[in-house]
Image: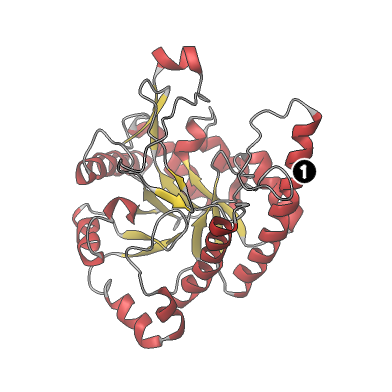
Amino acid sequence: MVQLGVYNAILHDRSLTEAIKTTAELGLTGLEINTGGFLPAKHVPNIDEILTSDAARDDYLANFEGTGVSIAGLNCNGNPLHPNAEIGDKHSADVIRSIKLAERLGQNRVVTMSGIPGAEPGSKITNWVVNAWNSAALDVIEYQWGVATKFWKEADRIAADHGVKVALELHPQNVAFNVATIRELVERTGATNVGVELDASHLFWQQMDPVAVVRELGELVFHAAAKDIRINPENVVLNGVLDNSFRKLSPSEPRTNLGGDEWANEWPKNSTWDFVAVGRGHPAEYWAEFLTALHEVDPKMWVNIEHEDTSLGREEGLAVACETLFKAAEIAKL
């Protein structure tokens, strides 16, 4: 059956040993480890040492021995195409380093995002064209495809050399965010080792059906994230799912750095949609279909919970997600 784990970002408040213990207590068998990008590599701070020292590698792997929990892929979500070199160079280096680290740790999956460049050469900020109704917008997209193709063709070659599959989250504000664009990226690069991390949440709010996407992409789906959203009908009827009512946080407020001088904004007060614990947006019956579709692609695929429901605590939200997924697996007879 598909394997159930958790993405460790929600457990960055504790040590690796404690994160593994929490994972096991939840009844999960895998921990997806962050290795850079938007977030620091909290649970593997000595990456460079592991890359060069067998002793360091073995010491790290020993953390998992006898726990019932294994590493369930590496994650370095970020923007490797960012036009600001302070961000783009770091994130792209993190992707390549994570591919090499995966091989060292006996892993064959690295999760990241395809990234998004600026609108033209010399840009300093990113530009994601939401609706290319005018010719200039298509010119921007074509330039961006050129940047993306150059990076991902080389990254695919490196991934193939190291026996690793790179799974891209289909996330808005990236060149690849739906079926058409991931197929275009693969076609332009001739990629054999670049495919998809099927995070259901960002498909839901785009009004896509994750189950249909899995069945359409088939073997291009390498990895999956169990993450849910809730549409708020009283707000979405007025502002739609592209609502941009975010607030920029000041340096005096707690905020998350995304690289350079870029920071996560405060979520809209009257949001049109929200991240919720798995099961609070879509019932276990839906997740049973999701797990079934993934099982048809790869019976041993990792499906890792990503928890971002701010209304619930860390363990509380993970427990809700586990209850839903365990029930879904039972319904699906997996």
- Residue 310 vs residue 48: left or right? left
Quadrant where the N terminus sits is bottom left
| Residue at figure coordinates x 47%, y 57% from the top left | 37
- Residue 115 vs residue 233: left or right? right
Relative to residue 210, is residue 79 depicted above or below? Answer: below
Q: Is residue 37 visible?
A: yes
| Residue at figure coordinates x 50%, y 61% from the top left | 110
- Read off the residue under disc 1: 142
What is the secondary structure assignment of the residue under circle 1?
helix
Q: Position of residue 139 (x, y in %)?
A: 79, 38
Relative to residue 131, is residue 142 depicted above or below? Answer: below
Relative to residue 60, is residue 117 depicted above or below? Answer: above
User: Label 1: few (<14), some or many (≥20) within 10 Å?
Assistant: some
Q: Is residue 191 visible?
A: no
State the residue in front, 298 or 249: 249
- Residue 187 vs residue 327: left or right? right
Q: Quadrant of residue 49?
A: bottom left
- Residue 104 vs residue 269: left or right? right
Q: Quadrant of residue 292?
A: top left
Q: Position of residue 261 (x, y in %)?
A: 47, 49
Colouring chosen for the image of the structure: secondary structure
Badge count:
1
State the residue in front, 50 or 207: 50
Q: Position of residue 119 (x, y in %)?
A: 70, 42
Q: Position of residue 46 (x, y in %)?
A: 37, 75
Label 1 is placed on what type of residue?
Glu
